Amino acid sequence: MSKLFTPARLVMLTFFIQSAEVNNFYPRIPDLQAKLGIGPADLSLALLGIPIGGFIGTLLVARLIEKLTPRRTIMGGLVAFTLCQFLPGWAWNVPSLAAVLFLMGGTYVAIDIATNVEAARVQDDIGRRIMSTCHGFWSLGQILGIVAGFQFAQYAIDTRWHLLITGIVALPLGLWVAWALPSLDRKAPLTRAPIVSLPSKAMVGLCIFAFGVLLAELTTRNWGAVYLREVIGTSPGIATIAFGSFSLFMAIGRLSGDALTDRFGPVALGRFCAVMAVLGVLVLLGANNIYIATLGFASLGIGVSLGFPLAVTAAAGLGDRAPATNVAALAVIAYIGSIVGPPLVGFVAEGAGLRVGLAAILPLMILSALFAGSLKRRAAS
């Protein structure tokens, strides 16, 4: 049993399960929009609940992880998130939807950051890169979650019962895997984690790099299904293929990322991915059928695949503060991207259409490519 479920494999399974659970939600966003009868701008306001809840959580979670340990934080976060995830289907207006999404964002972030901290610690303990592979398992879970979500939508199964079923299946598995994570010998943190985790001066370039890549990923997750239905005109079943290509190529990039980083270095790889993300958006902007859209989503998947894993490894190994503090601070930037990106797309789309809305994030993505050099001295593990 111990040979099969090594620490590295257990933390990879944790990434997989949490992703499969949360990504069941995103394909149901168009159904929630239709149920409430709201436009892109109102939907953007409601979707702000997730990043705002996550943003507040990132400011506080480092101290929680230090007190409870990453393993216990993962377990507690899984329970709390599962209790919140089935609530969106019960929302009756924009404020109520925003409120329940706020709870989802605030509880999910505890799982997300604790799992990344645990992956960084396991990586240091075994002496080889696993961070990109861990995020590859997150992407595999994303594929499962998105496919399942689109199938539930295709058969018009009520969002309330769909997300409840997802939690009933995912929670026991997630708790078992988190419980099985071993206690590793770890060095004590350099300093006590601050109550509020914010980026240090040494992280500025790294945060700018991460921001644009994360902006592309989060915008795609929030608006991808809506874009396919409203702009390309696909059914939920066909949308599974196009949107699934995003997750598939993200998974391929991440599963090969550790070996590619050793061969080409984090700077070259980070810059390549940022450029591929820009190209993916450009292809989507010109897409007029499902085939071109699928190509655009595939390029986006490759483009966003390694940005966050490279940035997490760099942040955790920076050395100026405890890893949990720097990873939480990096997550603050991710959630700022969530607050800025998807609503920006929605409000621009309200007046100019989703194509123009999607184009609004391109300048920040280009800026990300320019700051890939910040990975140079920090990404070595």
Image (cartoon, grey):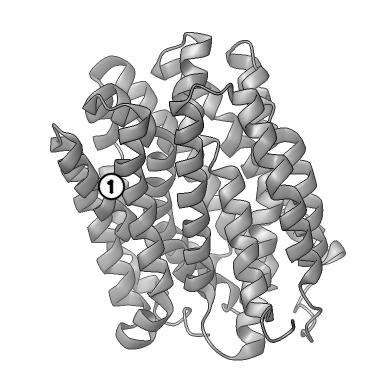
x, y (%) of residue 144? 50, 50
- Asked if residue 208 lies left or right of residue 95, the reply is left
Identify whether 241 is placed above or below 38: below
Q: Position of residue 166 (x, y in %)?
A: 65, 40
Seen from the viewer's position, the closer of residues 59 and 47 is 47
Residue 37 can be seen in this image: yes
Taking the spot 53% from the left edge, 85% from the top edge, the residue there is 381
**Residue 125 placement: quadrant:** bottom right
Q: Residue furthest right?
A: 67
Q: Position of residue 12 (x, y in %)?
A: 59, 69
Q: Vertically, is 166 above or below 202?
A: above
Kindly tell me whether residue 321 is visible in this rendering: no
Residue 75, given in percent of the width and then of the height, sits at 79, 56
Instruction: Please tell me which residue is depicted at 42% across the width and 65% down the height of the picture.
Output: 205
Residue sitting farthest toward the top: 37
Would you call the spot at circle 1 few (<14 residues within 10 Å), some (14-19), or many (20 or more)?
many
Kindly state the secondary structure of the residue where label 1 is placed: helix
**Foreground pick, 303 / 292:** 292
Residue at image location 17% in from the left, 42% down from the top: 291
Q: Quadrant of residue 61?
A: bottom right
Residue placed under numbered mark 1 in the picture: 297
The quadrant holding residue 345 is: top left
In this view of the protein, which residue sits in the foreground, 203 or 345? Answer: 345
In the picture, the quarter occupied by the N terminus is bottom right
Q: Is residue 283 left or right of residue 96?
A: left
The extreme front residue here reads 155
Query: Which residue is at a point 28% across and 76% down the rendered structure image?
Result: 268
Q: Amino acid at mark 1?
A: Phe
